[in-house]
Image (tube, grey):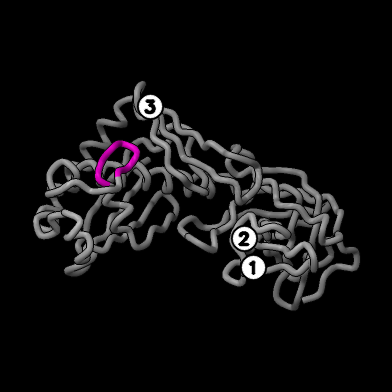
Amino acid sequence: MTTSDLITPASAITPTIIQFCHQAWQLNAKALYVESDDSKTYLIADVTPFHPVSHIWPDHPADQGFVNVGDVQFPVEDCLVGAIEQSTGKLHIAADIPVKRDTEGWAFVVVHQLPTSASMIKVNDEVVLSVDKEYQASLSRGHSAGHIAFLALNKVLAESYWRKDADRKDPLGSYDFNSYAQVTSFVTPELCTDKYRLGKTLKKRGLNVADMLASLDDIEADINQMIAGWFAEPTPVAMRLEGEALTDSRYWEWQLDADTLVSIPCGGTHIENTSELKALSVKLTQLDDQHIEMLTHVIR
């Protein structure tokens, strides 16, 4: 790939300031890095409202939207996590990132993938970054719905399906089935899809797997009833940030009731109040003798 004629010194490329947890959908920013080839252009700015897909746990898709430079508009084809080695200026993308976050000498950045024609953007240009608000909101609803559903799943299972104490507890004090068994989790508009593995290790930890599989319909009904009770009154949700960089820790926090604040580490985008979800519909399905799937639909 070739970079633009005017290049920011590598040492001056700082970690991207993220604004996707601040209900911000359009920002003016400065181009810090532009790199192009015959199929795409990578743009890094000093600040962004775009949420990138994680290269470590890709549960939450990249935001969609546009980048404007003057009167010219480019679609954001993808949004990725990158890391720049500040001694060389070399950009590594997603799975090619060779270091852990906050490694000294590296800047973790949000990389906006644009069409080849965006190579006309120059370093230090002012750009306008605009996120598709409705698409981001649909993902935020799906992601928050997934958190609420797994808390209900954990609680229902803890009440009847564990025969001994489990070491891991979730923020509500339930045995953390979600943490033990989750294989994948994917957020899509108005939906969260979680897959769980019910293997020998989980049985040894004390889960009555056979009883659970035989009672999936009852468990599903109990989950939906529990969530309906939680949603009887609207309650606030917020993101707590430990910094403004992509690699700083972020927490999804839900004020379930006056006495209960749920806090879960999470890097995605989310709702601000459960009233945005209206209602949820959780469906449990056995895929085979060791796997189940939980679909959490947002009903609006």
Q: The residue tagged with tag 1: helix, strand or loop?
A: strand
In-front residue for pair 18/65 = 18
Predominant SS of the magenta segment: loop
On the question of residue 29 being in view, the answer is: yes
Of labels 3 and 2, the one closer to you? 2
Q: Which amino acid does label 1 sit on?
A: Ile
Q: Is residue 228 above or below residue 212?
A: above
Q: Residue 93 carries which label?
A: 1
The magenta stretch is 169-175
Which of disc 2 and disc 3 is earlier in sequence? 2
Q: In this view, does 255 lie above or below 198?
A: above
Question: Farthest residue in the top direction?
Answer: 258
Residue 200, position as x, y percentages in the image:
19, 66
On the question of residue 275 being in view, the answer is: no
In-front residue for pair 74/86 = 86
Circle 3 sits on which residue? Answer: 234
